[in-house]
Amino acid sequence: MAHLKEIGVAVLGFGTVGAGVVETLQQNGELLTERLGLRLVLRGVADVDLDTDRGVAVDRALLTTDAPALIERDDVDVVVELIGGSGVARDFILQALKRGKPVVTANKKLLAEHGEELHRVAAEHQTELLFEAAVGGGIPIIKALREGLMANRIESIYGILNGTCNYILTRMEDEGLPFDEVLAAAQAAGYAEAEPSLDIDGYDTAHKAAVLASLAYGCIVPLEQVQITGIRGVAAADISCAARMGYRIKLLAIIQGGAAGVEVSVQPTLVAHNHQLAAVGGVYNAVLVHGDVVGTTLYYGRGAGRAATASAVVADLADVALNLRVGGRRWDLSGVRTKAPVVFRDPGEIVARHYVRFSMRDQAGMLAKVAAVLGSHGIGIDSVMQQEAAADAQYVPVIFVTAPARDTDLAAALRTISEQADVTDRAPVRYRIEDSE
Amino acid sequence: MAHLKEIGVAVLGFGTVGAGVVETLQQNGELLTERLGLRLVLRGVADVDLDTDRGVAVDRALLTTDAPALIERDDVDVVVELIGGSGVARDFILQALKRGKPVVTANKKLLAEHGEELHRVAAEHQTELLFEAAVGGGIPIIKALREGLMANRIESIYGILNGTCNYILTRMEDEGLPFDEVLAAAQAAGYAEAEPSLDIDGYDTAHKAAVLASLAYGCIVPLEQVQITGIRGVAAADISCAARMGYRIKLLAIIQGGAAGVEVSVQPTLVAHNHQLAAVGGVYNAVLVHGDVVGTTLYYGRGAGRAATASAVVADLADVALNLRVGGRRWDLSGVRTKAPVVFRDPGEIVARHYVRFSMRDQAGMLAKVAAVLGSHGIGIDSVMQQEAAADAQYVPVIFVTAPARDTDLAAALRTISEQADVTDRAPVRYRIEDSE
């Protein structure tokens, strides 16, 4: 192993994932050297806080608070950004790329918000930006989509991409508990943040969906183009009704291409029990990809956490190292974007079956009124289910399952119904339905 | 797109998959050019039979019976071998590699039997041999294992790798039919070969398992090291008994590493209904990989067929093309093999729960005799199930589910029982049990 080429690695951000990356390089360093024929050597770890115990032993001399100086070092060949957010993380990534140094990041928020700039700067400086850890934790979904399915026009991607949401929905179903109670338990157990909005309101899933869509369709997907609904509104009653009808509620990222344009959305969705994504429970993630040549493929694994994310970061480091050895970069995402811009689909034109829960006045004739409005908007009804309510309740939950309907038509019908104060006391809840193929 | 680099492709073998590759290059050629920034150009297709209609339109001038001449052409940069088998396929691959031309193949039999030679010659001539299509059809499992999970020590791989076997087992379960009847139907429908041994006796799965194990553990796995049991012996009664106990029978490739050495085996296995592989039905394949860093990941998709296999072949072509552009090869499997040889585990030392079906004399005291022999070999019994039999049957099927037991101990006990002609009239059937985690 004499004259083995060394690749110098700088890690920015010594939080959970940063410590996981350092630990993985220690634990499997020799194995990586055998597999790669070159050695990944940690040159330094930068963080503003060098005192917190990260649960991994690192030579104190490797720690620094001066990230810019670490990036500049001649013996640093690749920079790993694990700070998160779109503040200094962006500055440091740009600094590295402008020095022609490849960057590995897990930062989906930054990619979703500033991906175009970052990929452009990487291309301008003949280097690359890799981001396997940004979506699906340890699942090599970026590599599968970009390389493994290279021969395919991507028809659709359905993803469970946020472990916190999936954990909450799974526990709500398994234990029949309300959202607030499970969220509080998840926060106590460390599965949800004290400020949970990024996860439960769907933004994190949207960032990841934007990244996947950009790979699938060779375009930058502005976040404004992503329709986002989180899981705050999902009631225990919705989950139990869905279960009785043969469905589970999952927060799905839905990405679809086609003649009508690209759809990117995030929403609680009823998936049939025999759907490939229905069995994905707890903090696991899964991505179902339909390609025009390969057909259906599925990728499943831990969507977050120190070790799983570190696995993806180190895989990117290995890729970068192999590319540095041959002196080239393999990917130039900016090149893809020289094509005609992608057309985004008008969300109102999307046709799907829906689950709609009304809070309906408990009085004869109400059901007929709702059905009449739906009918007048051309919306077929597949089934109706009335839930039990307290004896003295003035309003009772009633679920309608619609036939496939245009979103605009359904929205108009629901608006009309909501305005009828003698029928309902609030806007209905509605979720899309995905039957299995 | 002026001066766009062209990569010349030669396809050897114009059968089902060859035609699929040609069709995919036609259908998604422009998309591939956009994604790659270079153009894959078909220079020729070689086959001994140029007259059969392959269901794809090809310029007659591209067809040739002279594979060696096609390989030699200066404008051929990469050779795709889709002839199959270990005869001329090996000769042609060696010819291409010795000319320094990268080769893409789907030939698991050849890789399992001659992989060491092929990888060595590729390394000697500074070129590469890619084989994504050899395992799991369109599922990018080779890439996942070799690149996506690079940071992981692979603890185990469980795979459903043969679509024909999975189709037969699925139909046997769904329709309660015997093996012979389903095999005949599968042959009539084109899901099984007229000579089905390669599939149903487990050899095809073993070839694929050997390829996966070689990647996971950086070694060549001789086929003699693979324990192989096919599905011919699986009775409808086994499937229904397993179902009643909460299991499905799947033909599993099992690859496990560890201090005791590497195990590579292929066998009908009872997997619990909530196991991730239990839901994989019909001709689909799936691979469950446990890595020490990433934890559990799963990959699922069509395991065979013209289009799915073509998707994997063209993905390899894209990889080769990107590598040719930067003038390097990324992989050198031969280098991995310079390490100390892998120790294979003594199959007799494997500890597992088992399903054992005896054909037992229908007479009082027999069950106690069997239980006594098992006990005397230290094998615990988790449950016993006696099946209904015809009123006049002398022997009845009785199922024992064992506690975890050493294979050698179980084999000795079963041998002892088989020798007791007053207890049973034939050797028992036994299958390993995999509970979910």
Image (cartoon, coloured by chain):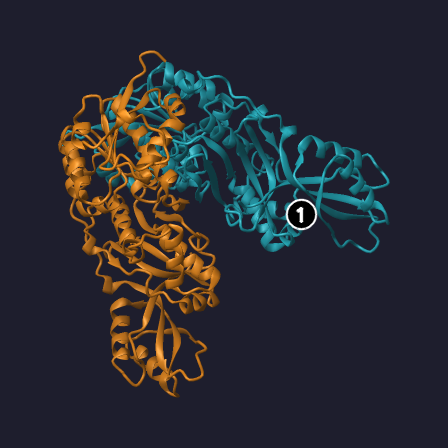
Chain colours: A orange, B cyan
Q: Residue furthest front?
A: A51
Residue A219: horizontal and vertical position, in percent?
20, 46
In the image, A125 versus A54, the foreground residue is: A54
Instruction: Please state, as top left, top right, bottom left or bottom right, where the N terminus of chain A lies in the image.
Output: top left
Q: Assign a secondary structure to mark 1.
A: helix
Q: Is residue B415 above or below residue B383?
A: above
**Quadrant in which residue B100 is drawn:** top left
Q: Which residue is mark 1?
A: B238
Identified at 47% across, 26% down, the residue is B217
B209 to the left or right of A195: right
Instruction: Please state, as top left, top right, bottom left or bottom right, where the C terminus of chain A lies in the image.
Output: bottom left
Residue A332: horizontal and vertical position, in percent?
20, 35
Total number of numbered labels?
Answer: 1
In the image, A247 versus A13, the foreground residue is: A13
Identified at 32% across, 15% down, the residue is A4
The answer to whether residue B172 is visible is: yes
Residue B296: horizontal and vertical position, in percent?
45, 41
Residue type beneath disc 1: Asp
- Crowding at mark 1 (Cα within 10 Å: few <14, some 14-19, many 20+): many
Q: Is residue B289 above or below residue A286?
A: above
**Quadrant in which residue B183 is drawn:** top right
In the image, B87 versus A125, the foreground residue is: A125
The answer for which chain carries disc 1 is B
Q: Residue furthest top?
A: A2
**Quadrant in which residue A331 is drawn:** top left
Residue B268: horizontal and vertical position, in percent?
61, 40
Q: Is residue A231 above or below residue A18?
A: below
The answer to whether residue B130 is visible is: no
